[in-house]
Amino acid sequence: MTDIRSSGEMAGHGIAEPGFSDFVQLLKPRVMSLVVFTALAGMIAAPVHLPPVAFFTAILFIALGAGASGALNMWWDADIDALMKRTARRPIPAGMIAPGEALGFGMALSVGSVIMLWLATNWVAAALLAFTIFFYVVVYSMGLKRLTPQNIVIGGAAGAFPPMVGWAAMTGSVSLEAFLMFALIFMWTPPHFWALALFMKEDYSNAGVPMLTVTHGRKSTRRHILVYTVLMVPVSLALAFTPVGGPVYLTAAVVMNAGFVWGAWRIVMRDEGMAEADRYKVEKKVFSFSLLYLFVLFGAILVEAGLHSFGYGAL
Amino acid sequence: MALRAEHEIYRRRFSRNVGVGVVLGAFVLLSFLLTVEKVTHGDPMHAIQGKGAVNPDGTPIVAQPLVKDSN
């Protein structure tokens, strides 16, 4: 008699034995990489320095705090994740990790990350990280996501906090530069996710998530993408005229904004017939370009920080 | 076939145990390095180093040798 089945599933539990990599998947590593990159930009652009171990500890626990919020999000959203093609293979709907394990893992990692960031840097950064986790899990996942088509607009704030947390970890406060970096990601999030929603159209309606594409239709979503992209332009350009900006950032921002607005304009000029005909080619391109947009602009902030340390840059 | 299935379970459990061990070891090492850095860089412990420590009346504390020279 054995309670081990050939599929690797424990009899009577319905949950397989999770490996270490399943817990890593619970942290949403791809989202974490974006968090690390933007938080790193916020930290390096700050006008002060931290000793190396404190610096490394700060970036590590900002990333793990973001990962913890991802685990808690997966715990809460396991029911709808199972219904969506994009998320059905996540560890909980795939039966690799029990929901309770994910909850315990996420809670422990959240508390640990906040405490370690506090010990390594200061309470302002730790409080901001705690608020980020709270905002993503409670305000976005438990509240907005299933209630309103504005879920992405307001919930986007959760993904926008990392550079502000990074800045606060270095300086112990929040300044205009940190706020503008936050605002840039905040304004970038809606067109980025709405472009995704246009070509992942079955997913959100199957799961009953009130994305703009489901509640207001696809034509309205296309208009919203253009409006939010245009609103994002002044925010991203404003950063060029702060101490973290400079000619390199300004050039990158002008070029990337032109590309993003052009892509949004092409999306709004298309209808569903055209999109279906070429399998959402433009929408997919704009989604990919939006990722490049954020990477280039925050990369330019890092370049400016390097130039400033040699006495160059700044407009 | 049955043996292979059992190996899969134990392989996953082993990978998890090794992973947790490595993470805990790294955490201990990081905590140690952070403590050393805090003590030596950002937060100097003046009282232990004898720099800037004062008596309640404000007079500086001068370190005295614990054992007097008997010669």
Image (tube, rainbow, N blue to C red):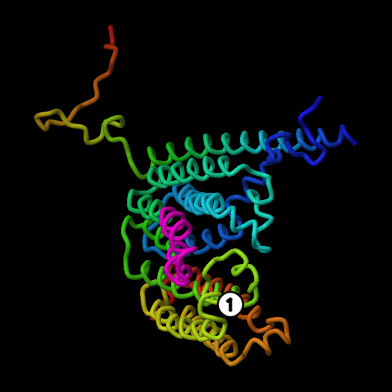
The quarter in which the C terminus of chain A is drawn is bottom left
Q: Position of residue B47 (x, y in %)?
A: 26, 31
Question: Is residue A6 rendered magenta in the image?
Answer: no
The quarter in which the N terminus of chain A is drawn is top right
> Which image quadrant is residue A139 in?
bottom left
Depth check: give the residue in front, B22 or A246. Answer: B22
Q: Residue at x 63, y 68 (%)?
A: A203
Residue lying farthest to the bottom in this orientation: A269
Question: Is residue A140 rendered magenta in the image?
Answer: yes
Is residue B46 depicted above or below A134 in this figure?
A: above
Secondary structure at badge 1 equals helix
Q: Amino acid at mark 1?
A: Ala
Chief SS of the magenta region: helix
Depth check: give the residue in front, A120 or B55. Answer: A120
> Which image quadrant is residue A164 in?
bottom left
Q: Position of residue A255 (x, y in %)?
A: 54, 85
Is residue A66 depicted above or below A9 in this figure?
A: below
Q: Residue at x 20, y 26 (%)?
A: B62
The chain holding disc 1 is: A
Q: Which residues are magenta?
A: A133-159
Is residue A279 depicted above or below B70 in this figure?
A: below
Q: Residue at x 65, y 78 (%)?
A: A284
Residue lying farthest to the right in this orientation: B1
Which residue in the structure is indicated by mark 1? A195
Is residue A185 in view from this perspective?
Answer: no
Disc 1 residue crowd, few under 14, some 14–19, many 20+, Cα 10 Å? many
Q: Position of residue A208 (x, y in %)?
A: 56, 65
Q: Residue at x 66, y 33 (%)?
A: B17
Q: Position of residue B23 (x, y in %)?
A: 59, 38
